[in-house]
Amino acid sequence: MLEELSLVLDEVPSDSPLPVYRSAIIESNVLGKATRTTRYRTARYVTELYALDPKASVFRLLRFFWSQEQAGKPILAFLAACARDALLRESTSFILATLHGETVYPTQIAELLRERYPERFRPTTLKSTGQNLASSWTQAGYLSGRGTKRRTRPVVTPTVAAYALVLGYLVGLRGKLLLDSTWTKFLDRPMAEVSDLVLEASRQGWLKYKAAGSVVEISFPGLLTPAEERLSHGSN
């Protein structure tokens, strides 16, 4: 729901609580939905994917990096959605394993879901779920094309790399593990390119990056709240 998220973030001040976001979608109809029922449904979907609550670390940090970024916004939104949607997060390994330029067919995605989650989906929902995943990957930049989908590389910037690292930090990863986590794999770049992006993010002030031989130190001074620091240390 990249378009909906973009419109909401353009209209709602960054320090607003969740009820203000919901009111913007339902009462003010900033997304231009035809019926009130559709507004409620859209508000629920966008909230499930992105939280729309500054008390949620994933969303608070998304809004921070969103304001610093333009080209990387699709993958920023994708990373946030993956943090909150286990199916999207787990199934993305399929698209990452697909070679760039290869065609991806809906039947492949449906078969992936059938094999990986044999008891979860009814046959009637496999197709629609696969289409939703393909749409998410297309919006993020992993796929391109309307009818025929081909594997492409998403636009990744130093700001996106910083967000990927802080998501790993929040679940307790430290040092070199931050450079080779689920979140950095979503950047779809070799390790050397990830390191270059992180180094540039450090130059821009999003984080502090120090490397001496095999020892890597990465921190986020001024970015995390004391509560987030305590939480991330507790999950380490």
Image (spheres, rainbow, N blue to C red):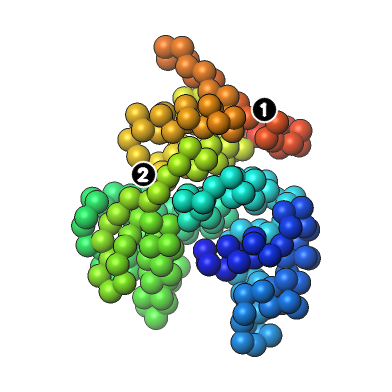
**Which residue is situated farthest in the bottom direction here?**
35
Image position of 223 with respect to 118: above or below: above
Q: Which image quadrant: the C terminus? A: top right
- Extreme residue toward the top, this view: 213
Is residue 236 in view? no
Tell me, yes or no, whether the two marked residues, 2 and 1, touch with CB atoms within 8 Å. Answer: no
- Corner quadrant of residue 174: top right
Q: How many marks?
A: 2
Q: Which mark is residue 188?
A: 2
Q: Is residue 49 above or below residue 220?
A: below
Question: Residue 133: image x %, image y %?
Answer: 41, 65
Q: CA distance from mark 2 to mark 1?
A: 26 Å
The amino acid sitting under disc 1 is: Pro
Q: Earlier in the sequence, mark 2 or mark 1?
A: 2
Name the residue beneath numbered marker 1.
Answer: 221
| Circle 1 residues within 10 Å: few <14, some 14–19, many ≥20 | few
Q: Nearest the camera: 70 or 164? A: 70
Q: Residue at x 47, y 59 (%)?
A: 87
Badge 2: how crowded within 10 Å, few (<14), some, or many (20+)? some
Residue at x-position 41% and y-position 29%? 196
Which of the 4 image quadrants contains residue 151? bottom left
Image x and y of residue 231, in percent? 70, 36
Q: State left or right for residue 36 relative to residue 139.
A: right
User: Which amino acid type is shown beneath numbered disc 2?
Assistant: Asp
For residue 175, above or below residue 43: above
Q: Element type at marker 1? A: loop
